[in-house]
Amino acid sequence: MSPLPTHDDVRAAAARLAGRVVRTPMLRHPVLDALAGGTVLVKPEPLQRTGSFKFRGATNAVLRLDGAQRAGGVVTHSSGNHGQALASAAASEGVRALIAMPQDAPSIKVESTRRWGAEITFFDRLNTDREALANRLAAERGAAVISPFDHPDVIAGQGTAGLELIEDATAAGLRMDAMVVCTGGGGLIAGCALAAEGASPGTEIIAAEPEGWDDTARSLAAGERLSADGKGSTFCDALLSIRPGEITFAVNRSRLAGGVAVTPEEVLAAMRFAFDHLKLVVEPGGAVALAAVLAGRVPAKGRVLGVVISGGNVDPAVFARTLG
């Protein structure tokens, strides 16, 4: 296993990414505070380049490549957000990218990935070992594998979202009691946990996952990496990891306060709330943390909560269902 990233790595990533990623704002809304019964600070990563937080980690990882690795190009597997983020980051540095995507990936994510000039190969989501596939493709090409989440440079880059939220809260005279983070493989929440460890050590970090895909919560409770049953809805396509990453769980197991799961109906309600009140277009997986707060899964009364809305790359048909 690679060396675990640290708070200092998140700080270094923030310096490296300055001017390359969008410093998304901290949002507040009185209706959200009233419904939650506390103070809710929203980090809106749909406003990030390529529409999700993934651009942070992908860019940090590409910038950390040495000359030989750049020449060989990069390979990853992704349902879409990491794929298009890596495609964009690689293009900006003149690095070739091959993205393995599920056959049922949302068309908006496929089109965006292709727009950045990446080569795409498709696989069967249910019957393919995606890590083995990425490793085989990389070996054939002499390329570097940039995992969607289980990579120290990716984790450090994702953590810059949490670090920015902590800094903006501090500037507003607030200290977060907890930060709720959308969680799939665990890269974003691992980065946020490392950010908080050095910048806001009293802030609890809570994983929010789709019902039936709560592998992080199950693993935290057991003290070891466990798999989700995989029988839940596939509505939150960005968060359908079966098991936490080896590196991400090594970071998260001692740093997270626990995890909660939300239903597809609660996610739809959160997407609609974000559109109506925050004026944000949010994809299902990106709305899971907000759904957890709106559904009362995370105690908010009298507390200050941070909520990371992780992405906005939603298919128009799915968003039409939200508005309907």
Image (spheres, rainbow, N blue to C red):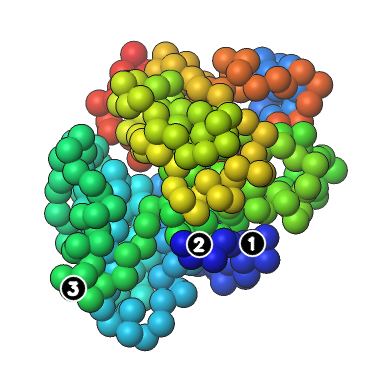
Label 1 vs 2, first from the N-terminus: 1
| Residue that appears at 50% across and 22% down | 261
Q: In the rendered structure, which disc, 2 or 3, sits on the residue that comes first in sequence?
A: 3
Which image quadrant is residue 141 in?
bottom left
Rounded to the nearest angstrom, the CA distance separating label 1 from label 2 is: 9 Å
Secondary structure, mark 1, is loop
Task: Give the x, y percent position of residue 20.
Answer: 50, 67
Q: Residue at coordinates 62% horizontally, 15% vertically from top-left?
A: 296
- Residue type, numbered disc 2: Pro
Q: CA distance from mark 3 to mark 1?
A: 31 Å
Q: Secondary structure at mark 3?
A: helix
Tag 2: Cα neighbours inside 10 Å, few (<14), some, or many (≥20)?
many
Q: Amino acid at mark 3?
A: Arg
Q: Position of residue 203 (x, y in %)?
A: 75, 40
Residue that numbered label 2 is attached to? 152
User: What label sits on residue 81 in the rendered view?
Assistant: none
Residue at (64, 39) in percent of width and height: 256
Q: Residues within 10 Å of mark 1 (few under 14, many from 20)?
A: many
Which residue matches tag 3? Answer: 141
Looking at the image, is 188 positioned above or below residue 2? Answer: above
Residue linked to disc 1 = 6
Residue 227 in view here: yes
Q: Secondary structure at mark 2?
A: helix
Which of the two residues, 39 or 76, is positioned nearer the viewer here? Answer: 76
Closer to the camera in the image, 164 or 209: 209
Q: Position of residue 170 (x, y in %)?
A: 80, 48
Q: Is residue 190 visible?
A: no
In this rendering, the answer to whether 215 lies above or below 71 is: above
Whole-number angstrom distance, CA of label 2 to CA of label 3: 22 Å
Q: Is residue 309 left or right of residue 304?
A: left
